[in-house]
Amino acid sequence: MIVDKKPDTSDPPPYTSESDGAGPSTSTATSTSPPDIARCNLLCVERSNEKINGSYIVDPSINIPEQFLQPLREDEVADDGRRANLRLVTTHSRIDADVWVLDKSDAKVQTPNRLAFQSTHGAVDIRLHDLGRKAPCNITVRNTHGSTTVQLPRDYVGKVTIHYKHGSVSALSPRMAMLSDVNGERKCFVGDLRSIGNDEWHGSSVDITSQHGKIKVTFAGDPVETKNTSSSGGVWSWLSGSRTPGSSSASSTTVTSTAGTPEK
């Protein structure tokens, strides 16, 4: 189940701080409690000319009978018929989603959870607030024409692979160690590199692909990014004291939180 968001002017839910030692940062670890909405699992949402905008709480312990599910997609067939726990696909619009993944507490063997997001012509803005603690989570994000922003939980540990062709990649967070950057493919790791070991990595992974658009990866609780759009100095002039907020009525300032606020 989902809760579609209607355009409003409300602020995003508050963050609560916890200590975190997963890497250098200018702020403490943060997380957002999930809203009080119905849980979902094996959910597939596909739209052609309408944006996907909502909050999703994925509970892998929920069993959904096959008769209620869509036919397997190609990538799921190739993955031994293992469905994505959440799949959001749109063709001519954007995706703007907040996602939480719960732990499957009763399972003796924790199989990896899967999240998949795809847009052909539109921006993709995904805020992953919590991916659980017991099972790895494999996330794929595909975008052809549009910007892509993925916010990871503060405690995320795992691979991050970025594929870009005719777009660009924003400066990487200091929490991400770059392993390689060759021919439009960047391989990074978040966490202690020694935890990878000598064998193949079986933990969480994020795979982002964009053909024509900017890619940005952030972490929950990152400092607020302030963008100055005026020639008179904007908010930076206010902060430095070189001018007062009322000194120019023509100035325009846009403030964007990397925690992610749905498009109004």
Image (cartoon, rainbow, N blue to C red):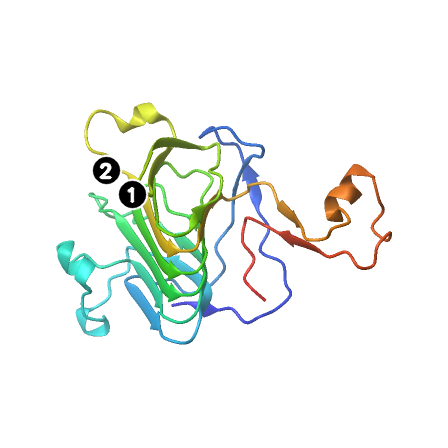
Asked if the residue at tag 2 contacts the one at tag 1, i.e. Cβ–Cβ closer than 8 Å, the answer is: yes
Looking at the figure, which quarter contains the C terminus?
A: bottom right
Q: Residue at x 20, y 33 (%)?
A: 200
Q: Position of residue 210 (x, y in %)?
A: 36, 54
Instruction: Give how far across and how far down residue 15 sits, in percent.
Output: 57, 47
Q: Is residue 144 above or below residue 192?
A: below
User: In the image, is 248 to the left or to the right of 259?
Assistant: right
Q: CA distance from mark 1 to mark 2?
A: 8 Å
- Give the mark nearer the N terminus: 1 vs 2: 1
Q: Residues within 10 Å of mark 1 (few under 14, many from 20)?
A: some
Q: Residue at x 65, y 52 (%)?
A: 255
Circle 1 residue:
136
- Lateral position of residue 24 relative to residue 207, left or right: right
Task: Tell me the crowding category of disc 2: few under 14, some 14 to 19, or many 20 or more residues within 10 angstroms, Cα based.
Answer: few
Residue furthest to the bottom in view is 49
Tag count in the figure? 2
Where disc 1 sits, the SS reads loop
Type of amino acid at the residue the image marks with label 2: His
Q: Is residue 223 visible?
A: yes
Circle 2: element type: loop
Tell me, for residue 202, which label it has, or none.
2
Locate residue 81, reporting x and y percent.
15, 58
Residue 150 seen in the current view: no
Q: Amino acid at mark 1?
A: Pro
Q: Position of residue 20 (x, y in %)?
A: 49, 31
Residue 47, relative to residue 87: is it above or below?
below
Q: Residue at x 18, y 70 (%)?
A: 71
Q: Give the camera-side residue of 256 and 17.
A: 256
- The picture quadrant where one finds residue 136 is top left
Q: Is residue 11 above or below residue 184?
A: below
